Image (cartoon, coloured by chain):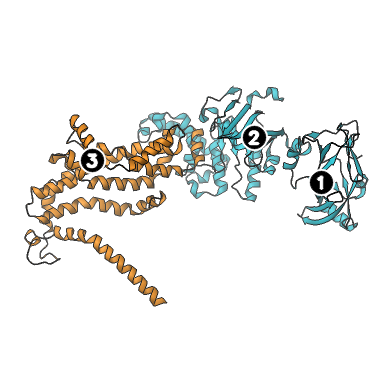
Chain colours: A orange, B cyan
């Protein structure tokens, strides 16, 4: 019996291990390539371990001779800008949908659910035309504008606020808090795990987004991280995939670091909202 | 003080409330005197909590008027009604410390909106001064409730009794005109409940503020209240002192609800000359019902006695002992009366009475039970209490 349990455990770990290797292989390859000398990338000999450590020159080229740092800064501006407006709108709206009684609430929430089913590609053309008419193409605003209102966040926070005890809200009203003040003094502090989880989703999605930036941005000055990589490939590097992978590693690094730091809170936020 | 002079308490006129198609309150009138401890007592679902929420402004009544201290407050939001509430779940702000919880009602009143906004609030030079005053008051209330050692803790780190005190402190700190309490003891264990009961009664005596207290527990109601409003199905069955409700229940429903163990109810008929018959025994009441009218006789457990010494002369009933329960200080005898249908009854004896009765062999079957005058109530066909006519002698004598 014990040997069977042991065998089952070995087997299941083997399966998990294979899955992990498949998932991690591209990242490992990216990191290996980023320290590989340029002449070896397309060399005849295939050896996973670089013959010589070329990390300094590759990362130096990515950092100082390319648009990648600028693209990362742009990415930070865009992601934080989107997140700030998303939280500022979704939290009060979710509270209202979850806890206030008003006519039309059911219809409004139905529309929110409907909004969940519409992908960005559907309104992309009218949005582009409107931004073009307003002369706002190739701006930070154009990059952020379609994502200011988040149906997903609204839904996530609403589910969370529905579990908040009604008596505490009543106590707050007796103490003199208005509904907005209830949101920022009571609901937001209680929703921090959900806010954390949502922030990770939002930042990852918009940091990595290629589709929308490709549509509205043409200049190097407004390039987001994936656009920065694209431009890098075409213009600066020629065949230097080592430097390109160094740029890719740099762009991935903030997200990986942020996830490692916030991992515990992220998982808790997901389990608390019942979305896992 | 008569009801006419009580405008400075809380006055409810014609309060009605329905949820969906269910009528919860049916046109209810109630005048609470300033400074009294009034308990809304009733079974769950009788509308007592809804009534409390209407007074607080957390629910809006369908019709009727709420006045506090002589002015109608129907148009006012909860915060402007000068009432504070202690909730069953205590409803403490979970992410704030005890000090933060106690300070919040004062911050809301004394700081401007700008002085409460995150980040911006620190720009106000006035804020630090106001907050110092608030914290001094918070500390004073905490000392009065003996929770000053807990000021830096979060609610999750407190015991049930400590949370209860914090909830009380949050209500006290703003000196409201009326305290509203919604079953504040129901989450405490039995021993703590007795202790907090005394503290609440003390607190009421010390503050002299109007308390409106909701409970389904008649012991809480009887021990703390100046007056009790007994509610059922959205109406007030009787409003009176604990003595009124126990000794002069207005109806059979009140008599059944108040008192534990509950009273024995015997179906009987009027004899046409102001009395009723129980088997061979006639009890004179001086009522005016025609012969044959169905009446109910309610007998408190302590209104039954065994024929020991001076008790021996009253009207007597025979009974058969079914079970005897020893509660230490008293005994409860469950008996079947020797009447048509053998109706069950409960007899309460003190330990001393029980011992004397056992010594003189009075606990052998069949028992002889003597009815005392006090604790025997007659109810008419509509369930309303029939006052004994003083011209006739009452039950015994």
Q: Can residue B133 be seen in this view?
A: no
Which of the two residues, B101 or B133, is positioned nearer the viewer here? B101
- Cα gap from disc 3 to disc 2, whole angstroms: 59 Å
The part of the image, by quadrant, that contains residue A19 is bottom left
Q: Mark 1 lies on which chain?
A: B
Image location of residue B151, percent across then percent down: 49, 43
Secondary structure under tag 1 reads helix
Q: Mark 3 points at which residue?
A: A77
Q: Which mark is residue B302?
A: 1
Disc 2 crowd rating (10 Å Cα; few below 14, some 14-19, many 20+) is many
Chain where mark 2 sits = B
Pointer 1 with pointer 2, Cβ within 8 A: no
- Give the residue drawn at x 73%, y 39%: B253
Which quarter of the image is occupied by the N terminus of chain B? top right
Task: Please rate how many residues cluster around mark 3, counting C-alpha atoms within 10 Å: few if below 14, some from 14 to 19, many from 20.
Answer: some
Tell me the residue that label 2 is attached to.
B234
- Residue name at image x 21 percent, y 61 percent: A25
Distance of label 1 from label 3 (alpha carbons): 81 Å
């Amino acid at each position: 019996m014990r040997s069977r349990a042991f065998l089952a455990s070995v087997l299941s770990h083997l399966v998990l291990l294979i899955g992990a290797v498949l998932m991690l292989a591209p990242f490992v390859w990216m990191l290996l390539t980023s320290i590989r000398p340029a002449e070896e990338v397309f060399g005849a000999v295939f050896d996973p371990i670089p013959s010589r450590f070329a990390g300094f020159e590759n990362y130096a080229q990515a950092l100082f001779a390319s648009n990648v740092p600028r693209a990362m800064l742009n990415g930070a501006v865009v992601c934080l800008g989107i997140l700030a407006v998303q939280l500022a709108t979704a939290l009060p709206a979710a509270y209202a949908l979850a806890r206030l009684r008003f006519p039309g609430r059911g219809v409004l929430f139905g529309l929110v659910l409907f909004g969940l089913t519409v992908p960005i590609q559907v309104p992309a053309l009218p949005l582009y035309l409107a931004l073009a008419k307003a002369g706002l193409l190739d701006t930070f605003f154009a990059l952020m504008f379609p994502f200011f209102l988040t149906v997903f966040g609204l839904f996530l926070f609403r589910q969370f606020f529905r579990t908040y005890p009604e008596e505490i809200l009543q106590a707050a009203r007796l103490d003199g808090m208005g509904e907005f003040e209830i949101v920022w003094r009571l609901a937001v502090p209680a929703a921090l795990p959900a806010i954390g989880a949502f922030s990770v989703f939002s930042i990852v999605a918009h940091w990595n987004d290629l589709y929308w930036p490709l549509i509205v941005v043409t200049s190097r000055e407004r390039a987001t991280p994936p656009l920065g990589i694209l431009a890098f490939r075409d213009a600066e590097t020629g065949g230097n995939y080592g430097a390109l992978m160094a740029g890719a590693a740099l762009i991935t690094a903030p997200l990986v670091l942020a996830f490692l730091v916030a991992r515990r809170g992220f998982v808790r936020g997901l389990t608390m909202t019942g979305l896992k | 003080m008569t009801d006419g002079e009580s405008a400075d308490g809380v006055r409810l006129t014609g309060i009605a409330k329905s949820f969906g198609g269910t009528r919860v309150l049916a046109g209810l009138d109630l005048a609470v005197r300033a400074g009294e401890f009034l308990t809304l007592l009733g079974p769950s679902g009788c509308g007592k909590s809804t009534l409390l929420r209407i007074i607080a402004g957390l629910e809006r009544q369908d019709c009727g008027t709420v006045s506090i201290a002589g002015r109608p407050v129907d148009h006012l939001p909860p915060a402007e009604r000068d009432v504070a509430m202690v909730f069953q779940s205590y409803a403490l702000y979970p992410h704030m410390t005890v000090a933060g919880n106690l300070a919040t009602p004062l911050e809301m009143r004394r700081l401007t909106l700008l002085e409460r906004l995150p980040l911006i609030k620190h720009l106000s030079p006035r804020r630090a001064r106001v907050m110092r005053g608030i914290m001094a008051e918070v500390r004073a209330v905490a000392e009065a409730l003996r929770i000053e050692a807990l000021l830096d803790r979060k609610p999750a780190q407190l015991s049930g009794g400590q949370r209860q005190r914090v909830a009380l402190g949050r209500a006290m700190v703003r000196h409201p005109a009326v305290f509203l309490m919604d079953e504040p003891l129901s989450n405490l264990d039995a021993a703590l409940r007795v202790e907090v009961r005394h503290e609440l009664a003390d607190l009421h005596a010390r503050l002299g503020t109007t308390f409106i207290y909701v409970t389904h527990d008649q012991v809480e109601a009887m021990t703390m209240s100046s007056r009790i409003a007994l509610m059922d199905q959205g109406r007030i069955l009787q409003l009176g002192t604990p003595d009124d409700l126990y000794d002069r229940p207005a109806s059979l429903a009140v008599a059944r609800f108040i008192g534990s163990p509950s009273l024995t109810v015997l179906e009987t008929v009027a004899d046409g000359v102001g009395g009723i018959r129980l088997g061979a025994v006639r009890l004179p009441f001086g009522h005016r019902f025609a012969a044959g009218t169905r009446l109910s006789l309610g007998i408190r457990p302590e209104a039954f006695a065994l024929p020991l010494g001076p008790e021996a002369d009253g009207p007597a009933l025979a009974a058969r002992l079914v079970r005897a329960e020893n509660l230490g200080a008293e005994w409860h005898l469950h008996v079947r009366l020797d009447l048509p249908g053998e109706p069950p009854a409960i007899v309460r004896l003190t330990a001393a009475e029980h011992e004397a009765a056992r010594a003189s062999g009075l606990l052998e079957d069949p028992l002889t039970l003597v009815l005392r005058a006090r604790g025997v109530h007659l109810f008419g066909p509509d369930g309303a209490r029939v006052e004994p006519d003083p011209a006739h002698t009452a039950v015994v004598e």
